[in-house]
Image: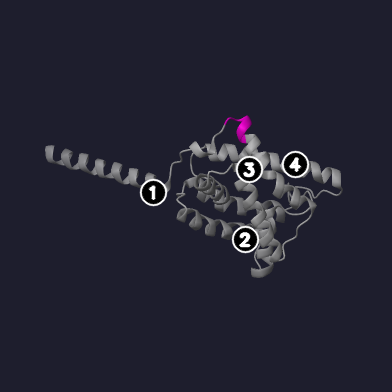
Amino acid sequence: MTINANLGLAPWDVFHQGMTHIIGITMGQASIAVGIILVIFNAVLGERLGWGTLCNMLFIGLFMDLIMLNHLIPICKGIIPGTIMMVLGMIVIGIASYFYIGAGLGSGPRDGLMIALTKKTSKSVRFVRNAIELSALIVGYLLGGYAGVGTLIMALTLGYIIQFAFKILKFDVSSIKHRFVDEDIKNLKAKLSKMKYQYANFKIKQ
């Protein structure tokens, strides 16, 4: 919705499009590639890998290509309908961020960066998110991504919208506790070890 509002790409999409010019891949593939890099960087900052992180990293890129290449969402023509679609898109992002982060299965690469920096700096979600969006915008623009007035609006307001959504839904992002891949693997090994022990005792009794 924010892309097809046709007022300029969202900051991260400016970055993704810049990558398509440099590497020659689709925007969805660029999204996945950036996600992989961010997952590694987030791990350095102390954010661990969750199943939701992997799904976010993979499926957003796949769905982006599916929707864009098949023209499933119309492209707006005109400032008013474009602005409406852009605002609705940002609202969807804010509410969706609550639902998938609140699921406790790990945040996506970009939101993981937001959470990690929020914890490390003790700054507000609004400040951290806006700083991230502006950084992605600048680098993407230098790489040749398309930026417009909508890009600037999203870069300056998306953090406010996400924080407002969290406030309305009474969600404290710094207190969220996720299930992580390494924990699930450890628990699975423990259960398998217990089952093996129980089976061995059963055989002895036989």
Q: Earlier in the sequence, mark 2 or mark 3?
A: 2
Q: Earlier in the sequence, mark 1 or mark 2?
A: 2
Which residue is painted at 21% across and 39% down in the image?
198
Q: Label 3, on which residue? A: 126
Q: Label 1, on which residue? A: 182
**Location of residue 124 (image quadrant):** top right
Q: Is residue 191 left or right of residue 152?
A: left
Q: Position of residue 22 (x, y in %)?
A: 66, 69
The amino acid at mark 4 is Val
Badge 1, how many Cα within 10 Å: few under 14, some, many 20+?
few
Q: Residue furthest left?
A: 205
Q: Earlier in the sequence, mark 2 or mark 4?
A: 2
Q: Earlier in the sequence, mark 4 or mark 1?
A: 4
Q: Label 4, on which residue? A: 87
Q: Earlier in the sequence, mark 1 or mark 3?
A: 3
Q: Label 2, on which residue? A: 30
The amino acid at mark 3 is Arg
Q: Is residue 181 left or right of residue 26?
A: left
Contact (Cβ within 8 Å) of mark 1 with mark 2: no
